[in-house]
Image (spheres, coloured by chain):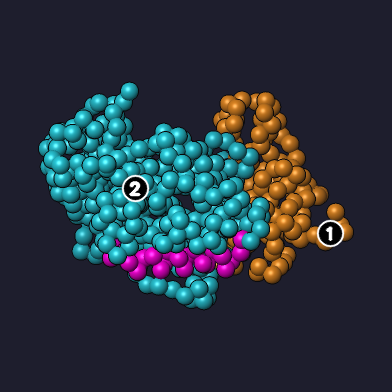
Chain colours: A orange, B cyan
Amino acid sequence: MPIVDYLVLDEPPRLVAHECAACQARYFDRRNACAACGGTEFTRVDVERDATLRAFTIVNVAAEGVPVPYVAAIMDCAGTTVPGVVVNTPPDPGHVRLGMKLRLTTFSIGIDASGVDAVSYGFEPVAEGER
Amino acid sequence: MTENVWILGIHMTKFGKHRDKDTIDLASEAVFGALADGGVGIDDIGVLGAGNLLGGPTPFGQNLQKQIGQTGVPVYNVANACATGATALRVAIMAVKAGETDMGLAVGVEKLSGMGLLAGDVATGTEQQWRPQGRFGAVTSLEGRVRTDTMPGVFAQIGMEYASRYDGVDFELFARIAEKNHAHSTLNPLAAYQKRFSLEEIMNDVMIAYPNTRSMCSANCDGAAAAVVVSESKLRTLSPEQRRRAVKVSASVLTSDPWEEGCQVLPDVSTLTRLAADSAYERAGVSPGDLDLVELHDCFATAELVHYDNLSLCEPGGAVDLFESGATWRDGRVPVNVSGGLESKGHPVSATGIANIWEVATQLRGEAGPRQVEGARVGLAHVVGIGQACAVHILEKSAG
């Protein structure tokens, strides 16, 4: 089961946004209307899986029980702004750099009493040559 | 043509730990101080704007009246995150401008001593059964799994986003901004912390959310601030001393976010600040180059840099150069946060938006003592409440 409903666990996994039919503004949450133009018709669109790191922080102090450190970041996915954690690289400023190329990936966050695995998403570095 | 509005009296309590005072005690102290400073009484006041977010029983403003004077005037209890105090002030200003009364009072207060992070979900363990809930259909807390909602982390990203667009922005630069504000605080007896820190101490302090270390974060503390505002026609009937010390509100502007791509993912503190500032400069007939001092919302060192740009204190993209020039130090061309800013003066959330106006007004009156900016005639005060609300006030010294 995906951690959020905008994560689709296909192979490969992908994020799906609500796109305003009138002005193409994109959102990840359930919508009442478009905040940009007021439109009420939305289509579902896949978000590009390749990302560029636009901003990040390395959180060392969080609320009780949240494992630290973690890298919370803002990705530019072909023009769509996406929140995500940066994973599969050490959480330090030597390894996490603005402008680095990343790609969507997933990781398990635990199995509930009925055996259902919950899966979150993050972004992992890709070598330049892979793009 | 609406009337000009002036600040007649204003007061800020000492910021810090006030173990023996509750929210109402602190707010009362600020109100009595502002009334005395203005030379008026509670019976002169025709409207009350009241701001408090975490203080307990509501309605706060009416509970306060029960201690300072129940005069039957309208009370507006407002909540606008960190812009709550400025919003309360703006309510009083609007009531005077609208002609509903010739004198209004605004107060903001918060008790935050000992509180840690003010946002960011606690961890939830593996659930009995994963069940999608809320607007994202989330099966659990997203903190650390998808994003961070901790304020140091949010504002760290805001600073790093600026770094991704312009050269010369790094951890050390942000730390040097905190070094400036802590240095300024040593001259402000009302600041919660008056300790000068070396750059090394700041950079080696406990890392909260890179690049913000503990001494680059605003200080949770207790405090209150209040202001009495008056119409220009009423002010003319008051004493020469009251007229001499009155400070003109040349612009009072409040904005929210216009939609921008990504603004619902990472708060965009820039667009609404730029809108508010541009509008304030136009209404006041003042340009950024006219400012003798600025109190801006340095809730984190990473925020101050971005707001140099947003308030047009520099050319777009020029925040690093502005800071490197030394302009924002107290003896510079446009001193920023001579009070010590939120990083050292402290940030009792609802008090902040009036306390920064107290600093500017005190400077324009020439009453700032050892930290006085010589010859200050025009100043700007700015706050951002995350979510978001931005208030910008431009104040001018009385000609009298």
**In the foreground, B166 or B141:** B166
Q: Is residue A77 left or right of residue B173?
A: right
For discs 2 and 1, the disc positioned in front in the rendered view: 2
**In the foreground, A16 or B303:** B303
Q: What residue type is labelled 1?
A: Glu
Residue displayed at 25% across by 56% down:
B367
Q: Which amino acid does label 2 sit on?
A: Arg
Distance between the alpha carbons at the discs numbered 2 and 1: 55 Å
Residue B347, image quadrant: bottom left
Which type of secondary structure does the marked residue at label 2 adopt? loop
Residue B153, image quadrant: bottom right
Which type of secondary structure does the marked residue at label 1 adopt? helix
- Quadrant in which the C terminus of chain B is drawn: top left
Task: Using a 10 Å C-alpha cutoff, classify the residue at mark 2 as few (fewer than 14 neighbours), some (14 to 19) or many (20 or more).
Answer: many
Q: Tell me, yes or no, whether the highlighted magenta stretch contains residue B183.
A: yes
Q: Is residue A17 visible?
A: yes
User: What percent of the width, then of the height, locates residue A107?
Assistant: 70, 59
- Quadrant in which the N terminus of chain B is drawn: top left
User: What percent of the width, then of the height, locates residue B350?
Assistant: 34, 49
Q: Tell me, yes or no, whether the highlighted magenta stretch contains residue B247.
A: no
Q: Which chain carries label 1?
A: A
Q: Which chain carries label 2?
A: B
User: What percent of the width, then of the height, locates residue B181?
Assistant: 43, 64
Task: Using a 10 Å C-alpha cutoff, classify the residue at mark 1 as few (fewer than 14 neighbours), some (14 to 19) or many (20 or more).
Answer: few
Please determine if labels 2 and 1 lie on a single subunit.
no
Residue A128 got which mark? 1
- The residue to which callout 2 is attached is B377
Q: Give the range drawn in magenta.
A: B169-192
Q: Can residue B88 be seen in this view?
A: no
